Image: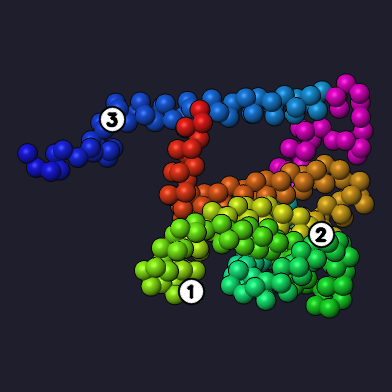
C-alpha cells in the first residue's frame, strides 16, 4: 500500500459533503454558543436605554435614543464616512510610525545596557506628560495639518509596543540562548534567531493595545486643531446641540477601535500560527 494511502486526508473532497457540512454546522453552533449570551446582554442594554428615554420623555439633545442615533448614522452616512476616512488615515499613519519607532527603541534598550539606562526612563517619563498639554505645542511647532495629529497618535501608541517588546526579548529561554552560543552563534545571531522570535507574541500584545488607543490619539489631535475628522465633527456637532450626531461619531470611533483590534489579532494568527496553537492547547488543558 502506498504511503499516501496511510496518511489522513483533511481536504474538503476527502471529507465528503455530508461530513464537511456537519463540521461547518458544529463550528457555527459553537461560535453562536460562545457569543449569543454577550449579544443578548448587549441587546438588552440597548433596549433598556430606549425604554428609559421613551418613558421619561428625555429631550433628544440631552440623551438621544438608540433608534435616533441609528437614523442619524444612516441619514448622515456620507458626511460621517468622509470624516471617518480622515480619522482612519491619521490612526494608521501614526500607528505605523509608532510601530517602527517602538521596535527600534526596544531593540536598542535590549542590546545596549548603556542606551537602555538612557532610553527606557525617557520612554516612561514621556507617558507622564498629559497629551492634551503636548498637542497644542505640536500645533505651534509643525503647523495646522495632518502632521501634529499623526505625532499625537504616535506618542500615545509607541509606549505599549516598546514595553511589551522589551519584556519579550528579555523573556527568551536562557537554555535556548546558551545552546545557540554553544553552537557558535554570535550576539546578532542569538538576537535574530532566538530572542526576536520569542518576543513576537509580546510584540503583538503591544500592537493590539497600541492600535486601539491610537484612535484616542487621533481624536485628541482633532480636538486641538483640525477642520475634518470624527473628533472635529463631534466638537462641532456638540456646539450645535446635535447630540445624535455626537453619539454617531462615538459609535463609529468605537467600531473603528474594535475593528483594528480584531485585524491585529487576525494578523497575529496568520503570522504566528504556532503561538495560537500553543495557546489553544493550554486552554483545552485548563478545561
Residue at the location (47% across, 32% down)? 285
Badge nearest the viewer, 2 or 1 = 1
User: Which of the 4 quarters of the picture holds residue 11?
Assistant: top left
Residue to which mark 3 is pinned: 17
User: Which of the 4 quarters of the picture holds residue 223?
Assistant: bottom right
Residue at the location (61% across, 58% down)? 167
Residue 220, disc: 2
Within 10 angstroms of label 3, few (less than 14), some, or many (20 or more) residues? few
Whichever of labels 3 and 1 marks the residue nearer the N terminus, that label is 3
In this rendered view, identify the residue nearer to me: 213 or 184: 184
Inspect this view and state whether residue 100 appears: no
Whichever of labels 3 and 2 marks the residue nearer the N terminus, that label is 3
Residue to which mark 1 is pinned: 187
Element under disc 3:
helix
Expressed as whole percent of the image width and height from the top left, the position of residue 22 reads 35, 26
Expressed as whole percent of the image width and height from the top left, the position of residue 84 reads 70, 55
205 lies left or right of 61:
left
248 lies left or right of 107:
right
Residue at the location (60% across, 69% down)? 110
In this rendered view, identify the residue nearer to me: 147 or 212: 212
Residue 268 vs 25, above or below: the answer is below
Whole-angstrom CA distance, mark 2 to mark 1, is 42 Å
Quadrant that contains the N terminus: top left
Whole-angstrom CA distance, mark 3 to mark 2, is 53 Å
Residue 265 vs 229, above or below: the answer is above
In this rendered view, identify the residue nearer to me: 239 or 35: 35
Range of magenta residues = 52-76
Whichever of labels 2 and 1 marks the residue nearer the N terminus, that label is 1
Amino acid at each position: 500500500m502506498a504511503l499516501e494511502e496511510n496518511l489522513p486526508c483533511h481536504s474538503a473532497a476527502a471529507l465528503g459533503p455530508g461530513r464537511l457540512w456537519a463540521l461547518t454546522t458544529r463550528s457555527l453552533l459553537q461560535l453562536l454558543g460562545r457569543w449569543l449570551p454577550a449579544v443578548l446582554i448587549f441587546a438588552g442594554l440597548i433596549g433598556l436605554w430606549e425604554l428609559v428615554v421613551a418613558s421619561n420623555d428625555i429631550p433628544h439633545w440631552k440623551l438621544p435614543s438608540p433608534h435616533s442615533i441609528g437614523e442619524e448614522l444612516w441619514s448622515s452616512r456620507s458626511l460621517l464616512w468622509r470624516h471617518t476616512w480622515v480619522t482612519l488615515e491619521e490612526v494608521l499613519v501614526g500607528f505605523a510610525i509608532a510601530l517602527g519607532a517602538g521596535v527600534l527603541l526596544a531593540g536598542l534598550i535590549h542590546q545596549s545596557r548603556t542606551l537602555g539606562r538612557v532610553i527606557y526612563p525617557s520612554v516612561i517619563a514621556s507617558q507622564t506628560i498629559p497629551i492634551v498639554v503636548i498637542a497644542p505645542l505640536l500645533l505651534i511647532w509643525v503647523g495646522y495639518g495632518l502632521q501634529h495629529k499623526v505625532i499625537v497618535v504616535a506618542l500615545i501608541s509607541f509606549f505599549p509596543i516598546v514595553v511589551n517588546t522589551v519584556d519579550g526579548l528579555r523573556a527568551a529561554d536562557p537554555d535556548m540562548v546558551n545552546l545557540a552560543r554553544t553552537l557558535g552563534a554570535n550576539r546578532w545571531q542569538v538576537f535574530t534567531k532566538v530572542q526576536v522570535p520569542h518576543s513576537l507574541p509580546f510584540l503583538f500584545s503591544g500592537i493590539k493595545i497600541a492600535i486601539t488607543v491610537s484612535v484616542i490619539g487621533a481624536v485628541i489631535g482633532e480636538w486641538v486643531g483640525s477642520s475634518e475628522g470624527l473628533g472635529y465633527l463631534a466638537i462641532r456637532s456638540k456646539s450645535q446641540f446635535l447630540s445624535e450626531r455626537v453619539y454617531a461619531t462615538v459609535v463609529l470611533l468605537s467600531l473603528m477601535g474594535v475593528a483594528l483590534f480584531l485585524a491585529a489579532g487576525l494578523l497575529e494568527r496568520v503570522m504566528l500560527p504556532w503561538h495560537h496553537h500553543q495557546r489553544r492547547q493550554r486552554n483545552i488543558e485548563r478545561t
